[in-house]
Image: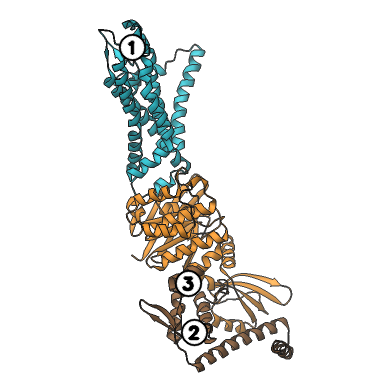
Amino acid sequence: MFRVVLYAQWKWSRLVVTLGTIAAFILPALSVQGASRDVGSPLKAGELLSLVQSWGVLYPVLAAALGLLVAIATWAPDHRGRHVHALSLPLPRWRYVLLRFGAGVVLLAAPAVALLAGAVLATHLAAIPPGLEGYPVALTIRFALAVLVAYAVFFAISAGTTRTAGAILTVIGGLILVQVLASAADVHLDLLTPVQSILLNWPGPLAIFTGRWMLIDV
Amino acid sequence: MFDHIDPRSPTPLYAQLASRLRLAVAAGELRPGEALPSVRRLAAQLRVNPATVVQAYRDLEHEGFLEMRQGAGTFVRDVPTGRRTSERIRQATVLVRQLIADAGRLGVSLDELHSAILEEMGAKAS
Amino acid sequence: MTHAIDIRGLHYRAGRSFEIPSLDLRVPTGAIYGFLGPNGSGKTTTIRLVLGLLRPRAGDIRVLDRPMPRQAADVLARVGYVPEQPHLDPTLTVREAMRFQAAFYPTWDHAWAEELLVAFELDERRLFGKLSKGQKGKLMMLLALAQRPELLVLDEPTDGLDPVVRRDMLAALIDYVSEGGATVFISSHLVHELERMCDWIGVMDQGRLVTELPMERFKNGIKRLVVSGAPPAVAAPFSLLSRERNGAATETWLVRGWEPEMHAFFDSVGASLQRVIDLDLEDGFVELLRTFRTLPPRPEEVR
C-alpha cells in the first residue's frame, strides 16, 4: 500500500521535490562563493561569516516552502474528490493519513540528503580561515527538522476538510488583521507577541526556523 | 434472436425468453444437439438478471425441450415432430387470439378480419 | 446472512433542509436490488450512509452482517463502490489507478482486471483526468469488479453515458453476478435499465422509503382498469388509488393489489370491467410517487 501511495505522491510533487533538491544542493556552494581554495586571496573570517549568514536566510525559507508545497501536493487529489475515494478504501482513516504523511517524509529526504552532500562539498572546497569550522551535518539536521516541522504543520492543516483548513487560516488571518488595525488605531493590543513567543521560542515548534543558519561558524 | 424481449410487457421476462426459445426449437431454428449460450453469457448479452435465464432454461428442460448437462452446458433436445408441430400450432393460436382481441378493440368485424387474412396470405403465396 | 444490507430505523439529518426521518431498508443477499427515486430523494445519502462515508444520528446499519460505520475498514474490503462522480487522482494513468486500487484489496483478480481492460477498450497509458465521461465510468466499474466484492454498490453508474457504454458496463456487471454470490445495490434514474436486471426494487422519495418488494410484485402491483357503469362510492377488495373520467362512457381507475379473480367484484356492483392495463416500471413508479405524495403521512412518521 505504501508503495502506491508514495508513487502517487511522487507524481504530484516531483517538480517541487526536484527543484528543492537542486536548490538544497547548490545553496551551500553559493553561500561560500569567493572562498574557494583556488582563487586568489582567501576571505577574512568576518567577511566569510557575514556572507554565510546572509545566504543562510534562504535555508529556513527553502525548508518552509518545501514543507508547504509537498503538504499541499499530498492532499490536492483528495480534496478534489472530497475525500470520497480515500474514505471508501478499506483501511481506517488514521492509517491512510499515516501513509500519506510517510510518503511525504520519504520524498522530503531527498532535499535533505542533497543539502548534506552540497554542504560537505562546499565546506571541503572552501578555504576556511583558522578559528572557524564547517558544520555541514548540524546544518543538515536542522534543515531536515525544519522541513519536517513545516510539512507536519501544513499537512495537518490540509488534511482536514477544506472548511477546517479555511477556518484555521481565517483565524490566523483574523489575528493578524486585528493586530494591524489595533496598531493603526494606536490601541495597545499585543496579540501576536505572546503567540509568537509560544511558537517561536524554544521549545516551541517553530523555534527551529529562527536564528542564524550558519554553514560555517566559530 | 432475442430482440423482442420487452421488460415493459406484462409477461415476465423469463416467460418471454422461454417462449422464444420454445418456438425456436419447434421451428427448427435451434437444431437438436445444438448448444445454447451459457446462462452467464446470455444474461450479460441481454443485460437481464441471470436468474431469469436460469428459470427459462429450467422451464424448458422441464418441458423436455432442453437438457442442462452439468459442466457441459445447455443443449437442445431432439423433440419429436408431433411435439414441435403442436408447439407451433399453440403459438399460432396465441397470435390469432391476440389478433382477434385487437380487431375487436378497433371495431373490425370477424368477417373483415377473415377477408384481410385470406388476401394477405394469397398475396404472400404469389 | 440473509441480508447483505440491513438498515433499521435510520435517522440522518444534514443542515435544516434535508432529513431521513426513519429508514428501514433490506437488501437480500444475492439479489440485484434497484434503488429508484427522484433527484433529492436521499438515494445518494443512503448509499453514503451504507458505506460509512456519513454517520447517522440514530438507527442501525449492517452491511455484510457487520455494523457500520464502526467496522467500515473491514467491510469496505468486501464492497465494490461505483460512485456518482468518478473522483480518482487525475494525474494517474489507467494502469497506475489499477495498481493503486489493487494494493488495497487482497481479493484483487489481476487476470480479470486485464480482461476487463481489453473488453472496455481502455488505454492503460491515458491519464485519468483526460478520460471521457464514459471511459471514466467504465474504469470505475472495472476497479469495483476486479476487486471481486461480495457486495456492489453503484450510485447512478450509467448516468449521462451513451447507450453503448451503458451496455458494456451492465454486461460486465451481469457477467460478474452470474458467477454467483454477489449482491448488487444499484441506484439509477434509468428505470428501464433496472427493469431488466433487478429482482428487487426499492423506491425512495423525500427521505422516505415508499415501497420495497420483489420486482414481479411491483410490476404487477399497480394497474389501470377501464371501467364503465360503476357507482360513485365502492368498497373494493383492492386499493383504489384514483378514478378519472374518460369522456362519457368509461373511467380509468388506478388500483393497487389487483388480482384477476376480482373482476367478479365489478359484476356485483353492476359495473363492467373493460380492460386491465399493465403499467411498466416507469409508469408504476410515477403513479406510486404521485399517490405517495398526495396521501397524508401516517401518524408514526410525524415528528
Relative depth, front residue between A5 and A85: A5
Residue C188: horizontal and vertical position, in percent? Answer: 52, 59
Q: Amino acid at mark 1?
A: Asp
Label 2 crowd (10 A; few <14 / some 14-19 / many >=20): some
Number of dots carrying numbers: 3
Q: Amino acid at mark 2?
A: Arg
Residue C22 location, quadrant: bottom left
Question: Mark 1 — on which chain does it sit?
Answer: A
Which residue is denoted by mark 2 in the rendering?
Answer: B31
> Which image quadrant: the N terminus of chain C?
bottom left
Relative depth, front residue between C257 and C53: C53
Q: Which chain is orange?
A: C
Q: Is residue B74 above or below residue C160?
A: below
Q: Is residue C64 above or below residue B31?
A: above
Question: Mark 2 — on which chain does it sit?
Answer: B
Which residue is denoted by mark 1 in the rendering?
Answer: A38
Q: How is the image coloured?
A: by chain
Which residue is denoted by mark 3 in the rendering?
Answer: B42
Label 3 crowd (10 A; few <14 / some 14-19 / many >=20): many
Residue at 45%, 70% (x, y): give it.
B41
Q: Is residue B53 above or below residue A173?
A: below
* Cβ atoms at labels 2 and 3 below 8 Å apart: no
Residue C7 location, quadrant: bottom left
* Mark closest to the chain's N terminus, 2 or 3: 2
Q: Which chain is brown?
A: B
